Image (cartoon, grey):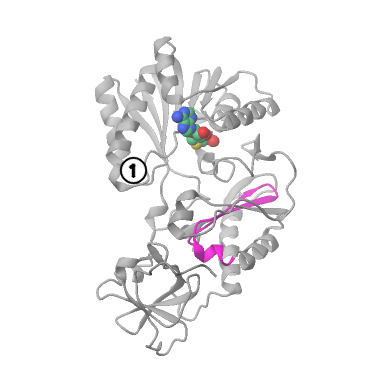
């Protein structure tokens, strides 16, 4: 069990017994219950009055309002600001193996309905709160799974959950990943590498829109591939016919290859600062027999200046930078950075060019992002027509009761 010796922010009162329920209880402060009756799954330390009963981090607790009313059942982690993650609002439902099985089955059923859960394909099988499984992401790459463990609640139950995943998917291997931010916030161990099964040497090959991509499950970014951009890659390609395309922050070439093959672009230049990503992108161009794409290792912020100095012009530009902000405090700074690169991209666009501009910063809202584009239009004197306002693919659903898991914006625009 995890070390709980760090001072809990909420005192545990072990003298009181938990009337009626059995499991330890987390009592809410007066007037703090509303979000949880509203099915928001994160109980922050500030909402908690006290904990009744003896309980370790990672154990199941009941959330109680007004001294006696059951609100929900969840899992405790006093080391995190999210002290309880809620998993069920049904007092009769316990968080046992059958529960995890039901939730995983429901998540997989959705991907079946979407037509995403196909043999050679890749998709997000489980997306955390949006699938009622707070703190857990599962991506499937052909016959292999990658589980991103973002909460202690999940970390201490891997031996229970992973075998269920294997049973339900027939996966040949399960690898683990965890993001640094969550490791720190949740007080869990960094999880990286093969958890069970066998993983062949070298990349796993997946297909997306008829294109083949090699995915590095061990050392690749995130869980190996940016699955969230799947539909955006295809949709953006529709506007690329005959154009010279610049794909900035191209990673393993997803937008570039879609532009070249699906979109019949004339020529594509893809740039990313990661050598590993560019090596994968080159290999991906080769296995798809694409010759009119060139990939370069470069800092994209510098590349924007260099391309301007050389007088280069493009008919379409894709901008898909990494997150610019992790906190609400730095949203303005992030918006200024978005403004700068979008403005530079617009300056490189031919008249009537296409700008595909993305932001994966969850703290930057759609409205903020649109407003930023309006500033770019003013400063450059070019009309920007937003043709499509898109988000992540539907295997990354947004929970209506946990809007925090919406993050991706992808706007396809015409720039006069
Ligand atoms: N468009 C890609 C995903 C991009 S993710 C796809 O569809 O797969 C963001 C990418 O930005 C990562 O590949 C990362 O290596 C790259 N990156 C981060 N900082 C960079 C910088 N300063 N210059 C160039 N690339 C950068």
- Residue 279 vs 221, above or below: the answer is above
Measuring 40% from the left and 87% from the top, which residue is drawn there?
A: 18
Q: Is residue 165 left or right of residue 183?
A: right
In the foreground, 388 or 54:
54
x, y percentage for residue 396?
50, 50
Quadrant of the snapshot with the N terminus: bottom right
x%, y% of residue 26?
38, 77
The one nearer the camera, 141 or 416, is 141
Residue 251 lies within the magenta run: no
306 lies left or right of 281: left
Which residues, given as a range, are shown in magenta? 134-157
Residue 219 location in percent, x, y?
61, 41
Residue identified by numbered label 1: 364
Question: In this rendering, is residue 105 above or below 256?
Answer: below
Residue at 53 percent across and 18 percent down: it is 242
Q: Residue at x 42, y 21 (%)?
A: 302
Q: Quadrant of residue 225?
A: top right
Q: In the rendering, at what x and y percent does residue 377 appear?
A: 28, 25
Residue 15, picture quadrant:
bottom left
Tell me if mark 1 has few (under 14), some (14-19) or many (20+) residues whose alpha carbon lies within 10 angstroms of its own. many
**Closer to us: 380 or 182:** 182
| Label 1 SS | loop
Residue closest to the far front = 5
- Count of residue discs: 1
Quadrant placement of the C terminus: top left
Visible residue check, residue 351: no
Respond yes or no on whether mark 1 lies under 8 Å from ligand 1: no
Can see residue 63?
yes
85 above or below 12?
Answer: above
The quadrant holding residue 90 is bottom left
| Residue 143 on the magenta span | yes
């Amino acid at each position: 069990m995890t070390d709980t010796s760090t001072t809990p922010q909420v005192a545990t009162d072990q003298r009181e017994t938990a009337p009626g329920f059995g499991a330890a209880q987390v009592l809410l402060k007066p007037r703090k219950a509303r979000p949880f009756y509203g099915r928001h799954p994160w109980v922050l330390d500030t909402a908690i009055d006290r904990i009744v009963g003896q309980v370790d981090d990672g154990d199941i607790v009941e959330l109680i309002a007004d001294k006696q009313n059951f609100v929900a059942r969840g899992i405790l982690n006093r080391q995190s600001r999210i002290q309880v993650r809620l998993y069920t609002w049904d007092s009769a439902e316990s968080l046992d193996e059958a529960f995890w099985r039901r939730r995983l089955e429901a998540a997989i059923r959705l991907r079946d309905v979407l037509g995403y859960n196909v043999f050679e394909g890749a998709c997000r099988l489980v997306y955390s709160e949006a699938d009622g499984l707070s703190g857990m992401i599962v991506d499937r790459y052909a016959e292999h799974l990658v589980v991103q463990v973002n909460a202690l609640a999940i970390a201490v139950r891997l031996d229970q959950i992973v075998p269920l995943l294997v049973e339900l998917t027939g996966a040949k291997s399960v690898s683990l990943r965890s993001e640094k931010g969550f490791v720190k916030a949740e007080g869990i161990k960094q999880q990286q590498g093969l958890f069970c099964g066998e993983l062949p040497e070298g990349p796993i090959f997946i297909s997306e829109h008829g294109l083949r991509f090699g995915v590095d499950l061990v050392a690749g970014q995130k869980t190996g591939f940016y699955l969230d951009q799947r539909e955006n890659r295809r949709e953006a390609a529709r506007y690329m016919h005959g154009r010279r395309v610049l794909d900035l922050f191209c990673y393993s070439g997803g937008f570039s290859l879609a532009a070249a093959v699906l979109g019949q672009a004339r020529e594509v230049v893809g740039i990313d600062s990661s050598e590993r990503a560019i090596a994968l992108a080159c290999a991906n161009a080769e296995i798809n027999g694409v010759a009119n794409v060139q990939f370069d290792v470069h800092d994209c912020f510098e590349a924007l200046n260099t391309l301007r100095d050389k007088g280069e012009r493009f008919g379409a530009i894709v901008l898909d930078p990494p997150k610019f902000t992790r906190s609400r405090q730095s949203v303005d700074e992030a918006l200024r950075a978005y403004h700068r690169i979008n403005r530079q991209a617009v300056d490189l666009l031919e008249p009537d060019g296409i700008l595909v501009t993305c932001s994966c910063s969850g703290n930057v809202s759609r409205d903020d992002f649109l407003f930023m584009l309006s500033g770019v239009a003013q400063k450059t004197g070019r009309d920007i027509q937003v043709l499509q306002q898109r988000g992540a693919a539907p295997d990354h659903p947004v929970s209506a009761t946990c809007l925090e898991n919406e993050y991706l914006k992808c706007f396809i625009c015409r720039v006069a």
